[in-house]
Image (cartoon, rainbow, N blue to C red):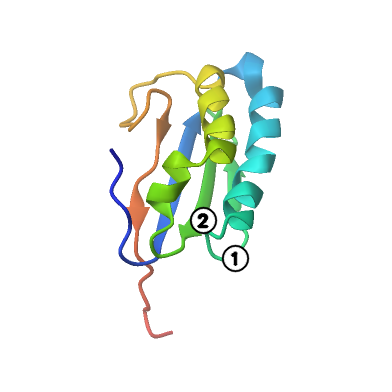
Amino acid sequence: MTNNNPTRQTCVWTFQVRPDSEDQFVELLKRHWPTLHDLGLVTDEPPMVLRSAEGPLTYVEIFTWETGGMRPAHDHPDVIDIWEPMKKYVEERTETHNVPGMSFPLFHRVDLGG
């Protein structure tokens, strides 16, 4: 079970996308952050989404969870309707992951005073 986040946390979701499933995956990814945002689970700052320029097809989505937003996402049917189908469009690789084909480490912003 996923713990809830006691503070805002920035998540770096990494998806190892199957090359033959990129279009279907992107359609789900387009709905991902807007759904989380509509539910009040993430901050207003839009996500940064990156696609690998070389090597295996990889997408990265970076956004910040609102305090306490993580656990409710795992229980909300609108989110589950996106997360579950995503699993069939990714493939397990040698990278560390939390779900086969996906990893999502959490980070805190660091102010470097500049």
Give SS at disc 1: loop
Nearer the N terminus, badge 1 or badge 2? Answer: 1
Q: Quadrant of the C terminus?
A: bottom left
Q: Residue at x 63, y 60 (%)?
A: 46
Q: Residue at x 61, y 18 (%)?
A: 19
Q: Residue at x 56, y 60 (%)?
A: 40
Disc ID at residue 112: none
23 w.r.t. 3: above or below:
above
14 or 74: nearer the viewer: 74
Q: Is residue 74 left or right of residue 26?
A: left
Residue 40 visible, this angle: yes
57 or 6: nearer the viewer: 6
Residue 56 visible, this angle: no
Q: Residue furthest top?
A: 20
Q: CA distance from mark 1 to mark 2?
A: 7 Å
The total number of labels drawn is: 2
x and y, in percent, of residue 43 in the image? 54, 65
82 w.r.t. 114: above or below:
above
Q: Is residue 15 left or right of residue 107?
A: right
Give SS at disc 2: strand
69 or 58: nearer the viewer: 69
Mark 2 lies on residue: 63
x and y, in percent, of residue 2 in the image? 30, 43
x and y, in percent, of residue 66 in the image? 46, 63
Disc ID at residue 45: 1
Q: Amino acid at mark 1?
A: Glu
Circles 1 and 2, Cβ within 8 Å, touching? The answer is: yes
x and y, in percent, of residue 94 in the image? 33, 22
Q: Quadrant of the N terminus?
A: top left
